[in-house]
Amino acid sequence: MKGFTIPLALLASLATHAAAQGSTAEILTQAHDLYERLDIERALPLLRQVVSPGWPFEVTAEQRVEAYTYLGACLALVGQRDSAVVYFRAALEREPFTDLDPRLFTPAQLELFSRARRLTFAVAARPVPSGRIDPRTERLTLTIVTTHSAALHVEIRPTAGFRGATLFDGEGDGLREFAWSGLLADGRLAPPGRYELLIAARSRLLGRVDSARVYFDLRHDPPPLEDTLPELMDADLLPEHLPASAATGDLLKGLGVAAGALLIAQVFASRDLGGTVPAGSGIIAGAATVTGTAAFLKLRRRPVLPENVAENGRRRAQRADSNAAIQRRNADRLAATGLIIAPAAGVGP
Amino acid sequence: MLLALGLAALEGTAAQQRFSGSAWASLAEHRVDAGFGLERASGLVFGAAVSAHVGPRLELALRAQGGSLEASTAGAVDRDLGEIALATRVAAASFLSLQAEASRRVYSSAIARQAWTLVGVGAEVQVPFIEKAVRGLARAGFLPVVSVEGLHRPDLAFTAAAGLEYAAGAITLRALYSLERYDFPAQDAGRRPEQLSALTLQLSLAPARRR
């Protein structure tokens, strides 16, 4: 009874003190100090307080993981091995990145922690770090962890649904880092948007599966690209076919010239100088009539304007050349595009 | 051949100087009734011109032509025709140009020599066919100044022409029927109508514009 009385009295004293201090962080600091002085008997109650449902103060996920870890470490030191493993597992389940520094913990603690890792299966990824990378020379470093050996699949994919890039597909155990170049599976630079880093794993020891997702936003920096030239509209092109009236128009022009020549010879010429029509006017009239008729027949048979067709072809080719040049310049700019990465909360904003 | 070589040489120079040149052959017919009945004479007339292009619209030309007309009616006499003219042309629109011309013409025969001084203004309309190389053209002009040795100023003096033009690169071929009509007032021998008509085939070289 005495053995309990002292700790209870101590606990009451500590609780009062904790209330006075009023924060989880301070209690954890005290417990850590006690642990460092190997005053395990006093450290344990403080740590149990923090993970207790009745603890009145806010406990962050990190603080809870720290409390579980030190509880496991304390219990390992006092020989309560199974309990130590339970607390280590609790820490690992909440934060798979949890690990013990071999310089600070005893081999026994490390062995129990390792046992907890083998009994627990979880995967996690660190939040994607913010920053800007040049895809030509830099890589985005992504960090993931599995608590023990597993078949591991790591993939980056846009939340919009199109195809992403597989970073790893194989065996993994513990902490791993992957470098992403910013390219997707098709070799193109990842377009701006929201992406997810997906980790899916199957435990080699337990046969269980686990997965984790981390989201991030990706933007291009900067460069604004040139727009290609729009399609040529009707207003941009010359008419390639003649209207039906064109043939008639040419016929009338020819007949008009012929009429003009005859008019000059017959009407404008002086009647006092003889009524015969000079041969010249007849020749011009005949030539004009033939020209107009030939033009009429030709245009009726083939109402195409070759000059306009050629000119339109030239304009189309010029547009195609301009667009090709724009695309080349855009490709050069895209090659120099930087990627701005920022962590995100979920699939959408 | 010589004509072609000459025109080619002219074109080479003209490419620098903005000159163009042309040459023509006309089948001309002269008719006049000086009170002794109709006199007709016809023959070939050859001519050439050189033009200076001043700016995009203005053209100055110096022309000369000459030939022999053979009498074809009783009472008519053979005569030679020689003419030199200074002309200017302003492009008022793509299809319309305005022209002014001053010329000196001489008819000479075995029995007489007659000099004419002519000043006229006119307009020429060119209508392109769909095949833009071919154009129809019509020309009309008024001659406010006609001075002929031994004759009064004519009551009526005008010119008119119609024809076709075919352009291929720098070369333009023109076929034209033209008429000049003069109605001189009555004098001792009565009224004197006179006209000169011609069927002309003209070859022009118009070099590209200097940039």
Image (spheres, rainbow, N blue to C red):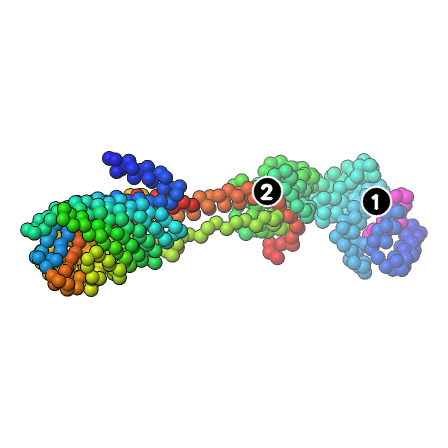
Q: Chain of mark 1?
A: A
Amino acid type indicated by mark 2: Ala
Compared across the picture, whether A185 is left or right of A115 comes to: left
Q: Residue at x 56, y 44 (%)?
A: A334
Identify whether A97 is placed above or below A253: above
**Majority secondary structure in the magenta region:** helix
Give the number of the disc on residue A74: 1
The stretch drawn in magenta includes residue A42: yes
Query: Which residue corresponds to the image point at 77% horizontal and 37% vertical from the top-left?
Result: A111
Answer left or right for A291 relative to A88.
Answer: left
Calculate the distance from the C-alpha at mark 1 to the C-alpha at mark 2: 54 Å
Please provide percent x and percent y for residue A9.
92, 55
Q: Residue A28, how many percent across, how many down?
A: 84, 51
| Chain letter belonging to callout 2 | A
Q: Label 2: which residue?
A: A336
Quick one: A349 or A287, which is closer to the camera? A287
Q: Quadrant of residue A56?
A: bottom right
Disc on the earlier residue, 1 or 2: 1
What residue span does the magenta drawing correspond to? A35-48
On the image, the x and y values in percent for residue A176 come to 67, 38
Q: Position of residue A112 (x, y in %)?
A: 77, 39
